[in-house]
Image (spheres, grey):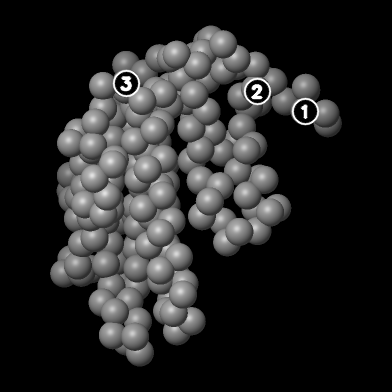
Amino acid sequence: MRMEQCGDCQALDEDLAGCGEIAERGHINPREINDNRQDAQKATYSMINMAPQAPKFNKIWSQLEAEVTKKAEKINKNKNNKSLYVITGTKISNNDKWVKGRVLFPRFFWKAVCYPGDKNAKQKPFGVGVYGENKSTTTKENMKVLSLPEFDEWLYGKGKGKHIFQGSVCDKRDIDMWNPLAEKDEL
């Protein structure tokens, strides 16, 4: 099957053509966090890894992603360290709009981060959930930084008993919280 034939099953580049003032291609999985592997970085430009973002929000979100990438690089410098786990997505509402009738413009972008800790390096586990409303008026101050239990309730609903890092050390209630928005004032 050729890419042109995928128009009925996924977004295409032309679905966002000419929408630059309203919507930009927002990466779900950012290019920079992929171990500097060229094939993995190139794959992030697929439309499957895209959701429309308001241009000003895209700038704030990309700076948040840069802080998460820096944290991952710092953790990876210590060869004894475990991995930093990052899950990113969008959350929709009943009032979300469609770009050109084909691509949903999600209300929120979110990111959950889990570091299981490393006893050898004496680094404690930490976790955090961050989300922001996908609109041009969103600022750093509007972004929400939550403990993972609070984030789970926002993402899944209160009392649902679901956890983004189900069964991991980050599923526990007493781990430290890292605030990526406090890392840099430029967000």
Q: Of helix, strand and loop, which one carries label 3?
A: loop
Across and down, in percent, residue 54 comes to: 39, 23
> Which residue is painted at 34% across and 85% down in the image?
121
**Quadrant, the N terminus:** top right
Three-letter amino acid code of the residue under disc 2: Leu
Residue located beneath label 3 in the image: 136
**Quadrant, the C terminus:** top left
Residue located beneath label 2 in the image: 12
Q: CA distance from mark 2 to mark 3?
A: 23 Å
Three-letter amino acid code of the residue under disc 1: Met
Marked residue nearer the N-terminal end (2 or 1): 1
User: Is 116 placed left or right of 6 in the picture?
Assistant: left
> Which residue is painted at 21% across and 41% down in the image?
144
Residue located beneath label 1 in the image: 3
| Mark 3 surroundings within 10 Å by alpha-carbon count, few (fewer than 14), some (14 through 19), many (20 or more) | some
Marked residue nearer the N-terminal end (2 or 3): 2
Residue furthest right as drawn: 1
Asked whether residue 128 appears in the rendered view, the answer is yes
